[in-house]
């Protein structure tokens, strides 16, 4: 397994399952969610993410488990947002170690409940089992779109590349937490790590605008997830590093603790922002939409035909290569 990247493993699974009939499933493996057609103007979405103890989280206190519950649901809602959809409901699969306290389970579900109420996603079932290797949390979310969803494969040559919010915050929060730098300057970054905000409203606006051609949510870092857009759309990208949006405090904290800003911005992951392309010639109209709807989004590059990922700094190509988070 260590010789395989996650995307290569997904391709192997796709080949194994390729002979199965998808019936009315229009989109299967390879996007943020699978898509099923219900009627001419109604599409169902389904997605799942797994969180593993010591890989994705370390939870020790009741507060930790409340935050974990929120995050477990929020990261799945982010996948629904990346299709332009809204959630219908969720089911929770839970592996519980024998050392766990029932209060930990209560706190976990308190966090799940808070997120579910905030984003109108009822929790309607699931399963529990004993785990011999730490906590395992598998969340499945069903969503819907009132028109065909935005996929990863729609980017076209000449389109512009955009991202919502700011990047690198969660990765910086993780760095600070690892090094036990838990002071006031790190509060914002820890909050971004522990309580991600799924961009459901913004994703819905992008779908309705008809100007967004391809979209993905950022879970494995900009450098990793932009490659998924590349693979799906058969295009390349140029990204201008200085245009990547970041919190005003980001560079100050990085410099103070000697963290590499670009590594966190591009490789850190867990941003749960939306990365997307806007149709060539629609940029001004799209900027008007952003202003009208109070959406925070920044143009950071463009789509090219050479099927390569190029990073520019002050309009010059840089030699350093960046990769996203590798699961294997």
Image: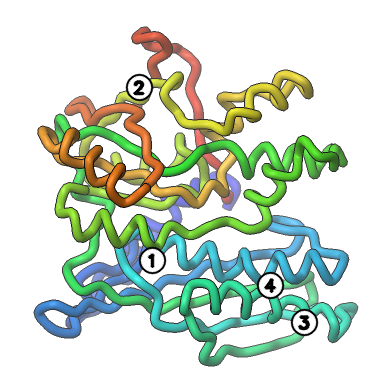
Question: Quick one: label 3, few (<14), some, or many (20+) residues within 10 Å?
Answer: some
Name the residue nearer the viewer: 134 or 284. 284
Residue named by callout 4: 136
Under circle 3, the secondary element is: helix
Q: Height in image: 128 above or below 272?
A: below
Does the residue at mark 3 contact the one at mark 1 (Cβ under 8 Å)? no
Q: CA distance from mark 3 to mark 1?
A: 26 Å
**Viewer-side label of 2, 3:** 3
Q: How is the image coloured?
A: rainbow
Residue named by callout 2: 310
Residue 265 image point, x, y percent = 55, 32
Q: Compare marks 4 and 1 and give the one earlier in the sequence.
A: 1
Residue named by callout 3: 105
Q: Which mark is residue 177?
A: none
**Viewer-side label of 1, 2:** 1
**Viewer-side label of 4, 1:** 1
Quadrant housing residue 291: top left
Question: Quick one: label 2, few (<14), some, or many (20+) residues within 10 Å?
Answer: many
Q: Compare marks 2 and 3 and give the one earlier in the sequence.
A: 3
Under circle 4, the secondary element is: strand
Residue 7 image point, x, y percent = 42, 50
Residue 170 image point, x, y percent = 63, 44
Would residue 283 be found to the left or right of residue 162 on screen?
Answer: left
Q: CA distance from mark 4 to mark 1?
A: 22 Å
User: At 50% across and 38% down in the image, what residue appears?
Assistant: 166
Residue named by callout 1: 80
Q: Compare marks 4 and 3 and give the one earlier in the sequence.
A: 3
């Amino acid at each position: 397994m260590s010789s395989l990247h996650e995307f290569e493993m997904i391709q192997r699974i796709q080949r194994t399952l390729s002979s199965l009939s998808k019936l009315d499933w229009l989109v299967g493996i390879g996007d943020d969610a699978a898509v099923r057609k219900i009627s001419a103007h109604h599409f169902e979405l389904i997605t799942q993410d797994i969180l593993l103890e010591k890989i994705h989280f370390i939870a020790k206190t009741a507060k930790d488990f409340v935050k974990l519950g929120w995050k477990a649901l929020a990261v799945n809602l982010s996948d629904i947002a990346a299709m332009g959809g809204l959630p219908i409901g969720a089911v929770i699969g839970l592996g519980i170690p024998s050392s766990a306290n029932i209060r930990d389970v209560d706190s976990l579900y308190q966090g799940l409940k808070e997120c579910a109420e905030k984003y109108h996603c009822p929790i309607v079932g699931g399963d529990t089992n004993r785990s011999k290797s730490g906590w395992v949390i598998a969340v499945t979310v069903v969503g819907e779109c009132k028109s065909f969803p935005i996929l990863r494969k729609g980017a076209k040559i000449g389109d512009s590349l955009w991202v919502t919010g700011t990047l690198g915050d969660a990765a910086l929060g993780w760095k600070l937490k690892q090094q036990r730098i838990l002071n006031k300057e790190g509060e914002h970054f820890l909050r971004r790590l522990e309580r991600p905000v799924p961009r459901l409203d913004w994703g819905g606006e992008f779908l309705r605008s008809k100007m967004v051609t391809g979209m993905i949510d950022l879970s494995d870092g900009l450098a990793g997830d932009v490659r998924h857009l590349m693979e799906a759309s058969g295009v390349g990208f140029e990204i201008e590093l200085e245009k990547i949006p970041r919190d005003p405090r980001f560079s100050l904290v990085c410099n103070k603790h000697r963290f590499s800003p670009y590594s966190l911005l591009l490789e850190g992951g867990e941003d749960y922002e939306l990365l997307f392309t806007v149709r060539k010639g629609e940029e001004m109209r799209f900027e008007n939409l952003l202003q009208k709807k109070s959406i925070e989004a920044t143009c950071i590059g463009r789509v090219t035909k050479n099927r390569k990922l190029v990073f520019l700094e002050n309009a010059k190509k840089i030699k350093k290569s960046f990769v996203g988070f590798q699961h294997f």
